[in-house]
Image (spheres, rainbow, N blue to C red):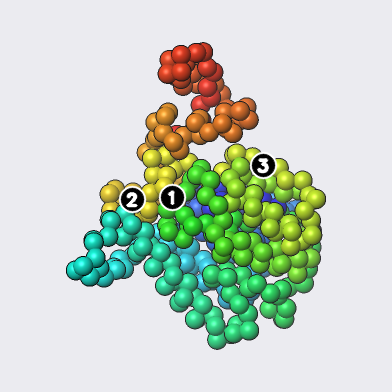
């Protein structure tokens, strides 16, 4: 099982399915829905009966929920809708532009969730729905397949964070899971258990939202004893100077076309951050102390040695 982030997982499936730079732009991986890959003896992916083009893997889901989740993922990733919030009353102070943008984004997410829930409610009134992804209760009924033949590789995007809900570019920021994200992880674990899937090893990024999602899933599977291998290379895309900014704000400042490329493409890098920016990994003791598989940077070593008045060897951590 690999538990990571939207773009790092898109990078993995890009290679598994040999997707082009153009095709990968249109691939979305919703939060908390397991994506199951099978491979032949030559480690080539086997096309699943219920796979979603252009992927060969299959999403495990309650009938109808995946379509709504994918639609929301595509909409939120590719567009900046134009909902507006009424101005406060004359006696109230005007809303800060940044907070206003965040409030608008939050409203949009709630409206999409509400629409998805109402659309699915006619067929699933007995099932409580977490956001628009997985039911809380264990699946049952003819719409679910029998236990999946092993061996498999299961890819899962971490549960939602408050940053996700507000539409912020999170990147390497260590945002914790929101309550909805924890529920999504629990639901994913129950779904995997209902399909009889068992794991022998788990891989996650170094970011707590992925690690916590993995722990919650393993708890539902009664498999907390499994080894968890944490790799910084599974971290989300490094968004550089965009880290912590809202998608709405970025689209307004730089244009929607640029925003889309920064968000989804693999050929356009976001603007870099400086060596002393708070979001630069080289200012995080975890990366400085434990990352050994990046080359040493002469430039970073020189400026840090001068800044701190002592000789320091510094690695070339990503700035974008």
Q: Secondary structure at mark 1?
A: loop
Vertical order, 73 against 270 (above or below): below
Residue 31 in percent (x, y) is at 56, 60
Return the residue nearer the eye: 219 or 87. Answer: 87
Instruction: For the C terminus, give its image quadrant.
Output: top left
Q: Left or right of 258: which side holds 164?
A: right
Quarter-wise, where is residue 198 in the image?
bottom right
Return the residue nearer the eye: 19 or 208. Answer: 208
Residue 307 in percent (x, y) is at 42, 18
User: Residue 250, which numbered label?
Assistant: 2
The residue identified by callout 1 is 169
Q: Kindly give the residue lying farthest to the front in the view shown.
A: 91
Q: Secondary structure at mark 2?
A: helix
Q: CA distance from mark 3 to mark 1?
A: 22 Å
User: Residue 309, which numbered label?
Assistant: none
Vertical order, 9 against 283 (above or below): below
Q: CA distance from mark 2 to mark 1?
A: 9 Å
Vertical order, 266 against 157 (above or below): above
Q: Left or right of 231: which side holds 259?
A: left
Q: Secondary structure at mark 3?
A: strand
The residue identified by callout 3 is 230
Vertical order, 117 against 29 (above or below): below
Is residue 286 visible in the rendered image? The answer is yes
Residue at horizontal 28 percent and vertical 56 percent from the top: 96
Give the class, few, some or many, for how many residues have Cα within 10 Å of label 3's Cα (few <14, many ≥20): some
Residue at horizontal 64 percent and vertical 40 percent from the top: 231
Give the class, few, some or many, for how many residues have Cα within 10 Å of label 1's Cα (few <14, many ≥20): many
Q: Which numbered disc, 2 or 3, marks the residue that appears first in the sequence?
A: 3
> Marks 1 and 2: in contact by CB < 8 Å?
yes
Give the class, few, some or many, for how many residues have Cα within 10 Å of label 2's Cα (few <14, many ≥20): some
């Amino acid at each position: 099982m690999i538990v990571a982030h939207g773009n790092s997982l898109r990078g993995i499936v890009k290679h598994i399915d040999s997707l082009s730079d153009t095709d990968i732009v249109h691939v979305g991986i919703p939060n908390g829905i397991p994506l199951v890959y099978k491979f032949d003896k030559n480690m080539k992916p086997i096309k699943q009966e219920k796979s979603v083009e252009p992927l060969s893997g299959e999403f495990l889901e309650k009938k109808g929920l995946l379509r709504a989740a994918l639609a929301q993922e595509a909409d939120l990733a590719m567009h900046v809708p134009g909902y507006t919030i009424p101005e406060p009353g004359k006696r109230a102070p005007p809303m800060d532009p940044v907070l206003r943008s965040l409030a608008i984004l939050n409203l949009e997410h709630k409206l999409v969730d509400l629409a998805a829930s109402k659309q699915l409610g006619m067929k699933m009134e007995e099932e409580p729905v977490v956001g628009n992804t997985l039911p809380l209760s264990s699946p049952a009924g003819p719409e679910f397949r029998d236990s999946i033949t092993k061996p498999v590789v299961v890819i899962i995007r971490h549960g939602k964070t408050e940053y996700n809900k507000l539409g912020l570019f999170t990147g390497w920021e260590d945002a914790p899971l929101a309550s909805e994200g924890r529920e999504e992880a629990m639901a994913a674990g129950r779904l995997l258990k209902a399909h009889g899937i068992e794991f022998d090893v788990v891989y996650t990024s170094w970011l707590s939202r992925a690690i916590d999602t993995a722990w919650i899933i393993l708890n539902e599977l009664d498999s907390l004893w499994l080894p968890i291998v944490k790799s910084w290379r599974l971290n989300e895309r490094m968004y550089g100077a965009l880290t912590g900014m809202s998608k709405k704000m970025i689209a307004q400042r730089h244009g929607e076309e640029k925003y889309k490329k920064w968000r989804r493409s693999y050929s356009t890098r976001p603007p870099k951050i400086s060596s002393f920016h708070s979001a630069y990994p080289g200012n995080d003791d975890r990366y400085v102390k434990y990352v050994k598989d990046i080359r040493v940077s002469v430039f970073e070593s020189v400026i840090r040695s001068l800044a701190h008045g002592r000789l320091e060897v510094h690695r070339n951590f990503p700035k974008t």
